[in-house]
Amino acid sequence: MRRVLAVVTLAVSAASCMSAPTKPAVDGGTGAAQQIAWGPCTDLKRPDGQRPARQDTSVRCAKLAVPLDYADPSGDKIDIALIKVPATDQSKRLGSLVFNFGGPGGSGVDTLDQAAKSLTGLRSRYDLVSFDPRGVERSSGVRCGDSAALDKYMALDTLPDNEQTRAEGDAANKKLAQHCEKDSGKILPYVGTVNAARDMDRLRAALGDEKLNFVGMSYGTQLGAVYATKFPQNVGRMVLDAPLDPTVTFEQRTVAQTRGFQHAYQSFLKSCVKDRCEVGKDVPTAAANVDRLMNQLAAKPLKVGRRDLTQGLASTGVAAALYSEFAWPFLGNALGAALKGQGQALMYLADSYTGRAQDGTYSTQMTSFPAITCADTSERPDLATLRHTEDAAVKISPLFGSEGAGGLCSVWPVKGNDEAKHVNATGSAPIVVVGGTGDPATPYEWAPKLTAQLKTATLVTFEGEGHGAYLSGNKCVKRFVDSYLLAGKMPERGATCKSV
């Protein structure tokens, strides 16, 4: 059954690497520091799965070997895929700035390659670095079945909201979990955020940095918070944008996200009718037209080439566009076209969200997500809890309501634990948390909660729409974050940025 994910939609798929070592450093207790052999990036991709034209030949890729199981550090190793965009002013270089753009499941390698052009201010003083976390894409990415099996899973409908639809979702979750165990069983017990934080400390040491400077977005805020809890003495300048509250249950997360997406959807409809889009003349009419479209697709999908645009894919496409206000005009056009029987644009949005390339292959974006999510909790909801969660979510929004990630975790083949839920960065350098009041995927209520849990953080509030504030283009947020990362100037308590 389709579920709403807290993933930054910039994230995509693939890159590999080699040569030119950086100076090793002391590892802070997690193992001997390695040299990184940086070399050309050979397989970077855009979010649509296509290879980009290489414009910046200074971009470098590499691999870092880390223990599969940190309880057995001399045992099996896995490779963590890395990317570096070197500082443009090496004479004023401050060190490395590591990014995680979200997920869990987003490829940091591909995303940084695409995002670097919007980070020119930071790049002037930092080497920008990112990576595919363990279990993601090139870093022993979690695979779950072939493309045909994933096509079937992603196309699953959530309408009509009845027991048959829900039973089909239950069966599909079980089958996907079985595929994951068959294809990726070796990595599944070791993909959690605590191990990813340990990997990140090895990366810090291999980069030659005494402290980790870090920007985490969406899921990246949880990774950063766990790192600051495990290695407070190694925290440099850290920004956590679009924060998760690690303490929420599956039910709390699902209800909060459903409410957030419904709020963003209503804001989109208001903007759409104001711009005289083809979805409807006013908000009630536009909403009714979209509801009618979804019900029609549940009864009879639209043909898009050799594929079917199902209701499940269409609603996924709508959710994908709600992550950024910049995508709203495209969504308006896509819905208008679908109401006329043309589903290509909605299919494109759905594919960009699920990591499906034009050739039909998938990144690990959607399969790494449950693997990491389920590893980070001992929760395994029973059927009654899942039904209660879905009932509560559907009441808020029939379009976005679902059982949430608990559906897959309830049948997941390996146990999880709650270590990543407990964060406290006491002893770390100051941390900046940025939360948006109109964020659909990580609702604003989570921002002050994470700030309080960390003990060492200061909250900046962005009064605007979209998932994530720093890359939204808001000048006020950019000023606060850049002043901190480049000059070490902390925002004042209660700092607020208005949407322009």
Image (cartoon, grey):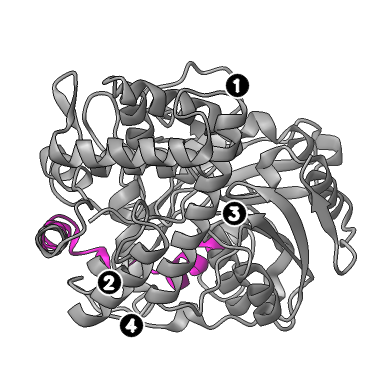
Q: Could you tell me the amino acid type at mark 1?
A: Asp
Which circle marks residue 56 in the picture?
1
| Nearer to the camera, 228 or 247 | 247
CB atoms of marks 4 and 2 within 8 Å: no
Q: Label 4 vs label 2: CA separation?
A: 12 Å
- Return the residue at label 4: 378
CB atoms of marks 1 and 2 within 8 Å: no
Q: Could you tell me the amino acid type at mark 3?
A: Asp
The answer to which quarter of the image holds residue 221 is bottom right
- Can residue 21 be seen in the rendering of this structure? no
- Return the residue at label 2: 189
Q: Image check: 221 left or right of 321?
A: right
Secondary structure under tag 1 reads loop
Residue 175 on the magenta segment: yes
The residue at 40%/55% (across/down) is 5
Is tag 3's residue or tag 1's residue first in the polypeptide sequence? 1
Q: Label 1 vs label 2: CA separation?
A: 37 Å
Mark 2: few, some, or many residues within 10 Å (few <14, many ≥20)? some
Q: Which range is magenta?
A: 173-202
Q: Label 3 vs label 1: CA separation?
A: 32 Å
